[in-house]
């Protein structure tokens, strides 16, 4: 293990986090709205501490020019430690600024930001200074693009081969980059991310949001994170005369950012044939439309609600859930049980691989369903040779086995974590539904769950131990299990 390499790169990563904190501190200093002085002090103090630790790590790694290649072993450790350190230091502003949080709550809020989960322990979001709310949105924006994928673009100018980092940052795994230089692919993704962010912000500003709220909500919608600057989330704007237009605009960007960003890269390279073989996007669109109409129609019939009003709330909720954004305009807790079970299923599935969404990912579900179909047919026709394709790519038996193993492990972690949560909350009279949905919402990076952690509630009433545990589950889900779990098996990265 090249410890100097690990120290050097994680140190630079902390310096990037410190720079983002300092930028939010500058905003708090210049903010014309009164009451941002405590945020300014907290952000600058946090940035200074992060910069000091980052600089020490860089010095420990040595000042010599790094090699042209980061080995896979070191890359896995850098990815895991990078997200853990970012979440730990990212929680400092919440500790240092009033109304303040304890250490567990600060780690939870920071991890929820960087992993774009959107769960919160803030009971009164509007009581916090605007500088802290901006930092809260920035963490999701950085987490959405992947602080380590963004880092690839920086490393390319430092002479560091960063392909291993790119491949181990879960949101952007895949083979769509082909033989192109991985740095070029990372830069293309960054440009697309910035373009979507700019378009979304300008649209929200044109619809009447202040620049502050437009930028904050843009950062959290393109990252499919779901943090809002209001206690009622996007529901704050539902009563506006153009509230429906704001919701539609956000639905469009939640959907766009749930698609594979590497698909955008391929299309920019004018490979239009790729659209014909794109299954994930078609399935995602179909799922959103079918389940929106099903739930909206069922709610209208069962409660005598006006269909268009039901359709509006249902469309926003379904897209927010399947994209794992977590924004809310309505409370889905009073919905029929079958409708809430559909939402749980959508939480589990998530968006497309290569997007900023969480969940199992739609591509894995397609592989699983097609593999199941083939095995059923094979039982009656054992001599038939099948070719399994997803998004135009042929998958071998090893790829299918890895997918099935991942899904099994994902579900096992949810079950075991629900048991752990039940133990941690044993004396707090928390229901099993709350524990299970809190775990699912954390591992799948969704945000709100059901019951006491529903869309109109928060996680602040949970014990500190539960908050730390759920924060760790957010990181586990964001890194798709292995990049974080491997840190607990030193033999894996010491020998190989």
Image (cartoon, helix red, strand yellow):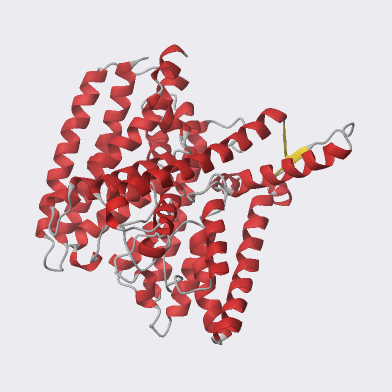
Q: Residue at x 47, y 22 (%)?
A: 72
Q: For the point 31% across and 56% down, which residue is it?
A: 137
Residue plotted at (90% across, 31% down): 383
Q: Position of residue 331 (x, y in %)?
A: 42, 72
Whether residue 94 appears in this view of the structure is yes
Please indicate whether residue 450 sits to the left or right of residue 359 in the image.
left
Percent of width and height locating residue 44? 14, 47
Drawn side of residue 275 relative to residue 164, left or right: right
Residue 142 appears in the picture as rendered: no
Residue 22 location in percent, x, y?
Answer: 19, 47
Residue drawn at the location 64% of the way across and 51% of the way down: 280
**Residue 131 in the figure: left or right of residue 415:** left
- Pick whichever, 494 or 219, lies toward us: 494
Q: Nearer the viewer, residue 298 or 95?
A: 298
Q: Quadrant of the N terminus?
A: top left
- Give the x, y percent position of residue 423: 34, 46
| Quarter assignment of residue 123 | bottom left
Check the image and report above or below for 340 versus 191.
below
Give the farthest residue toward the top.
495
Does 237 appear above or below 233? below
Total numbered badges shown on the rendered structure: 0
């Amino acid at each position: 293990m090249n410890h100097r390499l690990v120290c050097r790169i994680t140190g630079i990563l902390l310096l990037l986090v410190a720079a983002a904190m300092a930028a939010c501190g500058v905003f708090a200093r210049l903010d014309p709205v009164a009451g941002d002085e405590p945020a300014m002090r907290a952000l600058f103090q946090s940035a200074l501490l992060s910069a000091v630790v980052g600089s020490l790590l860089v010095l420990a790694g040595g000042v010599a020019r790094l090699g042209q290649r980061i080995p896979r072993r070191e890359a896995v450790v850098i990815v895991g430690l990078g997200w853990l350190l970012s979440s730990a230091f990212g929680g400092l502003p919440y500790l240092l600024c009033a109304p303040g949080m304890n250490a567990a709550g600060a780690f939870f809020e920071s991890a929820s930001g960087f992993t774009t989960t959107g769960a919160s322990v803030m009971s009164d979001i509007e009581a916090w200074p605007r500088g802290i709310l901006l930092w809260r949105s920035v963490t999701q924006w950085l987490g959405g693009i992947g602080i380590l994928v963004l880092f690839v673009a920086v490393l390319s100018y430092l002479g560091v081969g960063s392909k291993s980092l790119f491949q181990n940052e879960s949101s952007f795994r895949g083979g769509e980059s082909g033989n192109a230089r991985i740095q070029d692919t990372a830069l293309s993704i960054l440009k697309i991310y910035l373009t979507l962010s700019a378009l979304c912000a300008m649209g929200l500003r044109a619809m009447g949001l202040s620049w502050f709220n437009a930028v904050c909500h843009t950062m959290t919608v393109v990252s499919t994170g779901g943090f809002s600057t209001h206690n009622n989330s996007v529901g704050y704007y539902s009563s506006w005369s153009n509230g429906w237009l704001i919701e539609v605009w956000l639905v469009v960007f939640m959907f766009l950012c749930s698609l594979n960003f590497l698909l955008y890269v391929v299309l920019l390279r004018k490979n239009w044939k790729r659209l014909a073989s794109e299954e994930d996007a078609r399935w995602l669109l179909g799922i959103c439309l079918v389940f929106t109409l099903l739930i909206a129609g069922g709610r209208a019939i069962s409660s005598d609600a006006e269909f268009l009003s039901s359709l509006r709330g249902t469309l926003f909720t379904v897209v927010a859930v399947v994209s794992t954004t977590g924004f809310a305009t309505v409370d889905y807790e009073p919905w029929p049980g079958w409708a809430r079970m559909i939402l749980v299923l959508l939480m589990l599935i998530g968006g497309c691989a290569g997007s900023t969404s969480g969940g199992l990912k739609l591509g894995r579900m397609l592989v699983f369903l097609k593999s199941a179909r083939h095995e059923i047919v094979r039982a009656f026709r054992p001599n038939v040779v099948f070719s399994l394709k997803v998004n135009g790519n042929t998958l071998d038996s090893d790829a299918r086995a890895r997918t099935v193993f991942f899904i099994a492990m994902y579900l096992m972690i949810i079950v075991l974590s629900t048991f752990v949560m039940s133990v941690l909350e044993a004396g707090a009279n928390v229901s099993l539904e709350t524990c299970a949905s809190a775990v699912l919402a954390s591992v799948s990076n969704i945000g709100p769950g059901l019951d006491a952690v529903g869309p109109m509630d928060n996680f602040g009433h949970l014990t500190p131990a539960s908050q730390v545990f759920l924060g760790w589950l957010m990181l586990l889900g964001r890194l798709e299990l292995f990049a974080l779990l491997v840190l607990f098996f030193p033999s894996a990265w010491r020998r190989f």
